Structure formats: structure tokens, C-alpha cells
Image (cartoon, rainbow, N blue to C red):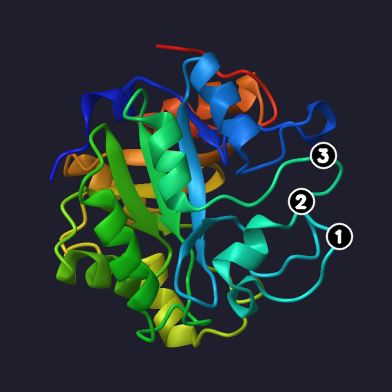
Amino acid sequence: MKLDYSFYHVPIAHRGLHNAAKGCPENSVEAIINALNNGYGIEIDIQMSSDCKAIVFHDYELDRLTNYTGLIRDKTAEELKKISLTGINTNFRLLKEILDIVGGKLPLLFEIKDQDGALGSNVGILEQEVCNLLSTYRGPAAVMSFNPHSLKAYKSYGGQLPIGLVSDSFKKKDWPMISDYRLALLRGLAFFDKISCDFVSHDFRNLEAKAISELRNRGVPILSWTVKSLEDEVIARKKSVNITFEGYMAKHG
């Protein structure tokens, strides 16, 4: 399935257009509304609560962005909704709530966070929940993950949106829990064709990688992440069709 036209032309705000110092922490309603008000697409992360609800949050632990400790997956959705993000009066939100706020106005890019722990096959519950929620969403959207099994599971439950692999150089120091053999497969994007992916979202610092170049030459859309300056945006746009950005105001068009 092809990406919507907007994914080629509307810069995507990484975890929303966030700025914690100004009351817009990452993946918050405020950051999402800020992105909408500035005409940007939105990338959000999806984690799972203990009662299998899709929660919009990046980390696996509460510690960095709240005054609580512990794992997201150990708390229910209702418990999480009562927790404020550090420094401001805004709380966790369910994916369903965010879908209602965006309402198809601008492109939405969903990253399903790995629930296996090592990008393995012990996934499916969160993917089914995401599939169910997105089945009635109307607007430009796409689903991506570092874990190819997550994308395969999403499609197995009837997911109709374009799917893409998130990738980087997959160095052992960054992924110590994964075998060298599997890292080589991930680095080479060996799962791209096996699960019929539609795009890749790749680290902008490594867009010359052999596997990325080969897919680009095939006409596969390559998105890039995470661009943090206008100077880096110029570099990223030479080898990718669009950028995911943060920390500055990306160029439109």
C-alpha cells in the first residue's frame, strides 16, 4: 500500500512538536496540538498498559518523564491516565483520544514499540489493539516498528495502513540483547520484502547504507529520523523523501 501524498510533503514532528520548557512534553496532547497548529505531521509512540490498552508514550519506564518509577506495562490505563508528565499538568493519553484530536487533519505516523524485549516474535496483543483502533480512522496514516514481527502481527489482524520498518546501523553496543546474526539481518533489512513493507524510516546519519541505497533505487520511500537542525535537514532531504524532526521548526514543502 502506498504512503499518502502528504507523507512526501509535510514534515513530521517527532513525538509531536514538543518543548518541555514551554509546557509541551513529548507525546503529550499539547505537543500534538502544537504540531497541528503549525501544519506539521505527527509521529507518536505506542506502548501497552497492563490491561492491554494502547498508550501514547515512548519509554518503557515512567522514570524519565514523570515523578513515578516502574514499567508502563505494570499499570492499567486508568492508573496511567492519572499520572502527570513532569513539570506540567498534563497526563498520559490513550491512542483513541489522540486519534479523535488529530481527526485526519495531517499525517500520523505510529511507532509500535517492541513488546518482546529483543525484537522477537513474542508480540501481538498491542498490535491487535492498534489494528482495531485504526480500522475506523480516516486520514493519512502509517504504522512502523523496529520489530518486523510487530508489523507482521498488525497485518495478520487485518491492518490496512502502509507499514514500514524503523532502522538504524544496528550496532551491537546499542542492541546488546540481540544476536550478531539477527543484527545483520536487521541491518540488511532482510525482513522488508518478507513482510511486504511499504516504506522505511531510517537514521538520517546513515542514509548511504547499502540496504537503504538498494531500496531507494527500487523506488521505495525512505523517511529519515531524527533531524535536529536546518543544516541536517538539508543533508537528510538529499537521500530521503521526508524527515522526522525535533528541536527546531522544519521547512514546509
Please tell me how crowded label 2 is: few (under 14), some (14-19), or many (20+) other residues with Cα within 10 Å. Answer: some
Instruction: Give the residue type that dot 2 points to.
Output: Ser
161 and 174: which is toward the camera: 161
Please give the residue where the numbered disc 2 appears in the rendered image: 84
When the figure is inspected, residue 187 is found, relative to residue 36, above or below; the finding is below
Which corner quadrant of the image does residue 122 belong to? bottom left
Q: Give the quarter of the figure containing the C terminus.
A: top left
Give residue 80's mark: none
Residue at x 62% of width, y 19% of height: 230
199 and 62: which is toward the camera: 62
Q: State how many labels appear.
A: 3
Which badge, 1 or 3, is on the more N-terminal residue?
A: 1
Give residue 88's mark: 3
When the figure is inspected, residue 81 is found, relative to residue 139, above or below; the finding is below
**Left-right relation of 19 to 96:** right
Instruction: Give the residue type that dot 1 points to.
Output: Asn
**Left-right relation of 199 to 41:** left
Q: Are marks 1 and 2 in contact (CB under 8 Å)?
A: yes
For label 3, the SS is loop
Please give the residue where the numbered disc 1 appears in the rendered image: 67
60 and 52: which is toward the camera: 52
Residue 66 in percent (x, y) is at 80, 57
Q: Give the quarter of the figure containing the N terminus.
A: top left
Please tell me how crowded label 3 is: few (under 14), some (14-19), or many (20+) other residues with Cα within 10 Å. Answer: some
Residue 75 in percent (x, y) is at 63, 74
Estimate the spatial distance between the alpha carbons at disc 2 and disc 3, rounded to whole Å.
Answer: 7 Å
Which corner quadrant of the image does residue 154 belong to? bottom left
